[in-house]
Image (cartoon, coloured by chain):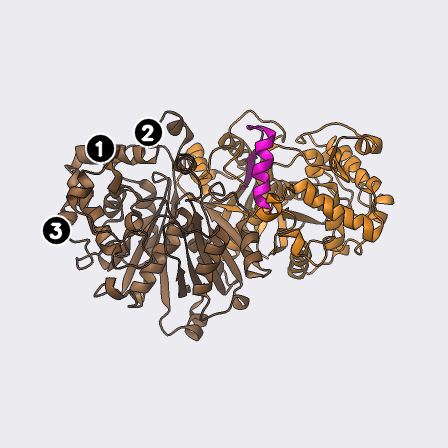
Chain colours: A orange, B brown
């Protein structure tokens, strides 16, 4: 596939006092150091909801802030918006209509009371499920309960995921949390929706991440180390848990992974490093299995033997994941790609994986209603 | 350009008791009579805001309602979302990656109190302008005031646009209003933001519109009268009126028109029928001039001599326009295309234009922050 990433930008996730426009512009400007905005043919913005910041029409906001007239499209598929923006940009480049595209994902979530924030996040779920009193922690808690019942996974396995991601985030200056935690810290933290506790849940965050994508020919002009997008899979299916045959897997992730591997002509065994969508610790575990890093139910063994640690056989979320790096919803899918690009360019500094030739991102919307999986290569 | 429309769907605009998912599905199913959902490769959804219906993640909602797994992308650029979905679908088809695409635009606006509705619509504007107390009627009123001052346009010219669009809507069964009005009715209607009165403003509406788009080769298999998309122009610029050199034109419309005409290799003179974005009557007038149907300031003469009537030299908004057909924000751009396709297929029944070979849609976001112009041909 004739699509490359030549530059990246990333704000520090967490509470950011700036408005969403300025946060977006910061990430864009970081990515625009080797190429000027005037050379960019089109822009794709990923953003979850205008309700957090009282601002939709972000294409016009960004045009105004950057003082440009160009073609700008916002895309949304809940928390999979970032991956979706990368997909739409890749289609635009493959069409030959555009050559150089800026992708930016952004969210500003900390400007309202947390009760309101959770209400807005809940809009990504089936409204019948929400009206019956559940929330996203509740939906993922159901998935965890069933996984425990069917496969013998337990709270300690999930706690180990949180501990790993917090440990990794210590080496990421852009992470929201720089706080080492223990398994006991997780297990004794406040209950959110049993078996998920506070440290099983990703936080409320502000932040933005950006990429410049272009054709291979153009990539060589701008960069000595362009990273190739070699596969991208997208799938959207039913949003409701109660309609699924099994709730221990996410069919959209299974389908998107299949498509991405087919396109990239690689298998799960070829992946050197992965960024998974750990909105909750159980999500990282389920995705490991759905993507095929192990069989369904065997995720717990990988966690037990340290396979997903930075020095393991398949490091997962070296940046700290949504759990510890933060989860500004629309930014997350783009942020995952930024990390994989840095790893493949050997520019991930303290958190650099030893051998990183091929990397994967898994970006999920809602309780698995939509998913985008992208595979990058040196 | 190898992109065609082979089927359309359209709900009756107005107050619709169904939820946004069911409204979307209705329009989709109407468009899916000559092709089945299983044959569709990807879907693009246009929607303005999740706040009206408390539901974002519409891709997953639609997948659930249609009981499918596929690739679904929501796009948004305020009220230009519908045109934008058509543009993204056209890129996807031109890329060769997808062949058959369903485009659906939808909005459910009547489910909340009107004060809240207006607050949500205002998110499409610059928040500084809004915080200083203006609203969309106020912004367009400023544009009208200045147009009056510079070019001698007056309230009666605007009233004539409303009267024409209400007259046209009488012949459109899907229109929200079937009510003939007089110039006097407009001039004596309640003041909204001087010089704009109630009948200068488009209403709050629910509704959806859908298109099936595909390559030329595929189009011939399904339809005897496919309509070709021959040009599409997209531009996004500054959102704020106070930063514009002139407020009597919308630079994004000027730029998008230029791009669309270049791509289609036609000029404004070649257009037989047009659907313009008359969110307010002044917008129809300004767009007539910005697209080049006449010189800046000469729109009033076209109105005076009836050029834009159904039997005029360049009929504008034969369906009733946003003013009388209704304006469910995300649906509007797609609805415009449905009307142009019907006109070019000679299937517009009572409101059929005599000679309709080439038609144009102008879909605008905010106070001209973004615009998509598409040109269709038999």
What residue is pinned by disc 1?
B146
On the same chain, marks 1 and 3? The answer is yes
Q: Is residue A210 above or below residue B25?
A: above
Dot 1 falls on a residue whose secondary structure is: helix
Quadrant in which the N terminus of chain A appears: bottom right
Dot 3 falls on a residue whose secondary structure is: loop
Q: Is residue A118 magenta?
A: yes
What residue is pinned by disc 2?
B242
Near mark 3 (Cα within 10 A), the count class, few <14, some 14-19 or many ≥20, is few
Q: Which residue is drawn at 50% across and 43% down?
A: B50
Q: In this view, does B322 lie above or below A29?
A: below
On the same chain, marks 1 and 2? The answer is yes
Q: Is residue A286 magenta?
A: no
Measure the C-alpha gap from mark 1 to mark 2: 13 Å
Dot 2 falls on a residue whose secondary structure is: helix
Q: What stretch is highlighted in magenta?
A: A104-126
> In the drawing, what numbered circle is on residue B244?
none
Residue A223 visible, this orientation: no
Percent across and percent down for residue B229 are 37, 61
Measure the C-alpha gap from mark 1 to mark 3: 23 Å
A296 sits left or right of A347 in the view: right
B48 sits left or right of B287 in the view: right
Ranked by sequence position, the earlier of labels 3 and 2 is 2
Ranked by sequence position, the earlier of labels 1 and 2 is 1
Q: Which of A60 and B95 is in front in this view?
A: A60
On what subunit does the disc labeled 3 rest? Answer: B
Q: Is residue B121 above or below residue B73?
A: above
Judged by depth in the image, the label closer to the viewer, 3 or 2, is: 3
What residue is pinned by disc 3?
B305
The quadrant in which residue A159 appears is top right
Q: Residue at x 43, y 73 (%)?
A: B222
Ranked by sequence position, the earlier of labels 1 and 3 is 1
């Amino acid at each position: 596939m004739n699509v490359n990433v030549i530059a990246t930008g990333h704000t520090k996730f967490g509470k950011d006092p700036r408005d969403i426009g300025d946060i977006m512009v910061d990430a864009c400007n970081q990515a625009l150091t080797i190429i000027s905005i005037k050379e960019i043919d089109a822009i794709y913005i990923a953003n979850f909801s205008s309700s957090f910041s009282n601002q939709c029409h972000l294409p016009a906001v960004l045009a105004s802030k950057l003082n440009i007239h160009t073609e700008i499209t916002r895309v949304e598929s809940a928390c999979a918006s970032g991956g979706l923006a990368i997909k739409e940009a890749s289609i635009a480049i493959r069409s030959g209509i555009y050559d150089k595209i800026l992708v930016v994902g952004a969210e500003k979530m900390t400007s309202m009371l947390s009760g309101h924030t959770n209400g807005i996040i809940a809009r990504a779920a089936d409204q019948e499920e929400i009206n019956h009193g559940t929330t996203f922690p509740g939906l993922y808690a159901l998935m965890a309960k069933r996984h425990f019942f069917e496969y013998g996974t337990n709270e300690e396995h999930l706690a180990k995921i949180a501990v790993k991601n917090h440990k990794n985030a210590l080496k990421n200056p852009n992470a929201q949390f720089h706080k080492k935690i223990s398994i006991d810290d997780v297990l004794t933290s406040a209950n959110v929706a049993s078996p998920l506790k506070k440290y099983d849940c990703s936080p409320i965050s502000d932040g933005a991440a950006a990429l410049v994508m272009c054709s291979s020919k153009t990539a060589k002009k701008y960069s000595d180390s362009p990273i190739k997008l070699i596969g991208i899979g997208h799938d959207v299916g039913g949003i409701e848990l109660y309609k699924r045959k099994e709730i221990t897997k996410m069919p959209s992730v299974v389908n998107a992974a299949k498509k991405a591997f087919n396109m990239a002509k690689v298998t799960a065994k070829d992946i050197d490093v992965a960024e998974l969508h750990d909105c909750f610790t159980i999500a990282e575990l389920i995705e490991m299995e759905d993507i095929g890093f192990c069989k369904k139910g065997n995720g717990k063994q990988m966690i037990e033997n340290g396979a997903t640690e930075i020095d393991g056989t398949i490091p997962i979320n070296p940046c700290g994941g949504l759990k510890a790096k933060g989860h500004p919803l629309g930014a997350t899918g783009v942020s995952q790609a930024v990390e994989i690009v840095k790893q493949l360019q050997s520019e991930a500094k303290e958190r650099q994986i030893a051998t990183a030739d091929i990397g994967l991102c898994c970006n999920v919307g809602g309780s698995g209603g939509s998913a985008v999986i992208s595979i990058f290569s040196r």
